[in-house]
Image (cartoon, grey):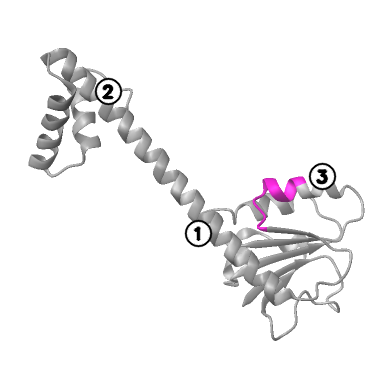
Amino acid sequence: MRVLLITDLPISTPFCDASACEYAATLAPSEFTEARARAHAPEIVVATLRAPNAAIFKELSLFNTPTGLPVIYVDHATDHRAAIAHLAAEAGVTAYIPAAQPIADSQSLLRWAQMRFQSIQKMQKKLADTEKKLADRIVIERAKGLMMQIQGIGEETAYREMRSQSMRHAVSMRVTAQSILDACGHTPGR
């Protein structure tokens, strides 16, 4: 697994051994940017820091996207651990580890972080899909209500007419519903 390591610790204590990972690059916090990190094509980002700052967490948050990467944060700071854990959570860090001692099984941790990140991505996609369906349903219901009011027809008839028009024009029900609202001067659905 290709790991991008961001660290302010001596390199003599690696995060993982050669059997668990291949280092794509090792960057100091001052060198770390999302663009520079992506240039190394890592599969996972590991930040193991003694003195984190807000800029690091801002850059790490850029990986918390649908095309992002899993991020492991190993906290070597001794002060303000609760505040650092909060910053890590807000940045979308996949795994936060307060480092009291060396990590014995880094390979399992890397795999777990990847699986957790993929699970979060699936949930985010599912949420976005659900929000879109809800928005579509709202527009369809508004158009159906408007048809019922203007044409004096029942709910089932209004729905069938919209469905028929959608099929005739080979467009989605949302598009048909929005065109009905637009034609009647009701555009808040967009």
Which residue was labeled with disc 1? Answer: 67
Q: Earlier in the sequence, mark 1 or mark 2?
A: 1
Q: Quadrant of the N terminus?
A: bottom right
Of helix, strand and loop, which one carries label 2? helix
Q: Residue furthest left?
A: 168
Q: Position of residue 13 (x, y in %)?
A: 85, 77
Q: Earlier in the sequence, mark 3 or mark 2?
A: 3
Nearer the observer: mark 3 or 1; the answer is 3
| Mark 3 and mark 1: Cα distance apart in space | 27 Å
Looking at the rendering, the stretch of residues picked out in magenta corresponds to: 86-94
Which residue was labeled with disc 2? Answer: 142
Quadrant location of residue 182?
Answer: top left
Q: Position of residue 63 (x, y in %)?
A: 59, 57
Residue 144 is one of the magenta-drawn residues:
no
Q: Quick one: 37 or 70, which is closer to the camera?
A: 70
| Mark 3 and mark 2: Cα distance apart in space | 46 Å
Q: Position of residue 177 (x, y in %)?
A: 21, 30
Measuring 14% from the left and 13% from the top, which residue is drawn there? Answer: 150
Which residue was labeled with disc 3? Answer: 83
Q: Position of residue 60 (x, y in %)?
A: 66, 55
Q: Quick one: 48 or 100, which is closer to the camera?
A: 100
Residue 4, compared with residue 71, is above or below; it is below
Identified by mark 1, the residue type is Thr
Identified by mark 3, the residue type is Ala
| Mark 1 and mark 2: Cα distance apart in space | 35 Å
Measuring 58% from the left and 60% from the top, which residue is drawn there? Answer: 117
Q: Quadrant of the C terminus?
A: top left
Identified by mark 2, the residue type is Arg
Residue 175, compared with residue 68, is above or below; it is above
